[in-house]
């Protein structure tokens, strides 16, 4: 139904900022709730941020509150993750995901139907 492609990752220093983008195919993007997850080597996939279908409500992991901002532009079929004040512990592969489930426990990866391939974010100390 939808294909997701992340971009914007890279190697930065602690304190720097990055903006990740997730481009979605198709013309039904606004029907999906969207989330960002991350996974570091030898770690479980971790919830980062989520946003409702029209961007009215957002949710964040405690570890990124005040530093990261999720947003979406449905006209461009794109969701963003603005990451400020990056820390070495933010280093991970970042994945965007789309969910069509009405209940939507958004912190759980199993709630999402579609996933991108991920983009690497590395933060040096």
Image: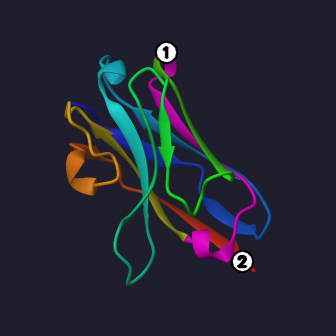
Identified at 46% across, 19% down, the residue is: 74
Outermost bottom residue: 42
In terms of secondary structure, where does tag 1 sit? helix
User: In the figure, residue 64 lies in which quadrant?
Assistant: bottom right
Q: Quadrant of the C terminus?
A: bottom right
User: Is 41 rendered above or below residue 117?
Assistant: below
What is the tally of numbered marks visible in this picture? Answer: 2
Identified at 77% across, 70% down, the residue is: 13
The answer to whether the residues at label 1 and label 2 have Cβ atoms under 8 Å apart is: no
Residue 117 covered by magenta stretch:
no
- The residues colored magenta run 75-91
Residue 100 bears which disc, if any?
Answer: none
Q: Quadrant of the N terminus?
A: top left
Where residue 34 appears, x then y in whole percent?
38, 37
57, 125: nearer the viewer: 57
How far apart, in angstroms, are the residues tagged by discs 1 and 2? 35 Å
User: Is 33 rendered above or below residue 122?
Assistant: above
User: In the figure, residue 99 lies in which quadrant?
Assistant: top left
Where residue 101 appears, x then y in whole percent?
19, 34
In terms of secondary structure, where does tag 2 sit? strand
- On screen, residue 1 versus residue 16, left or right, reads left
Where residue 120 appears, x then y in whole percent?
52, 64
- Read off the residue under disc 1: 75
Where residue 110 appears, x then y in whole percent?
20, 53
Callout 2: few (<14), some (14-19), or many (20+) C-alpha neighbours within 10 Å? some
- Read off the residue under disc 2: 124
User: Is 63 rendered above or below residue 80?
Assistant: below
């Amino acid at each position: 139904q939808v294909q997701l492609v992340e971009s914007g990752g890279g190697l930065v220093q602690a304190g720097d900022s990055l903006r990740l983008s997730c481009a979605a195919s198709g013309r039904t993007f606004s029907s999906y709730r969207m989330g960002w997850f991350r996974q570091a080597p030898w770690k479980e996939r971790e919830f980062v941020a989520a946003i409702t279908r029209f961007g009215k409500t957002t949710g964040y992991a405690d570890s990124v509150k005040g530093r990261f901002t999720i947003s979406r532009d449905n006209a461009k079929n794109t969701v963003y993750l603005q990451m400020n004040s990056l820390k070495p512990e933010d280093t991970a592969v970042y994945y965007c995901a789309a969910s069509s489930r009405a209940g939507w426990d958004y912190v759980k990866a199993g709630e999402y139907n579609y996933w991108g391939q991920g983009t690497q974010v590395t933060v040096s100390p």
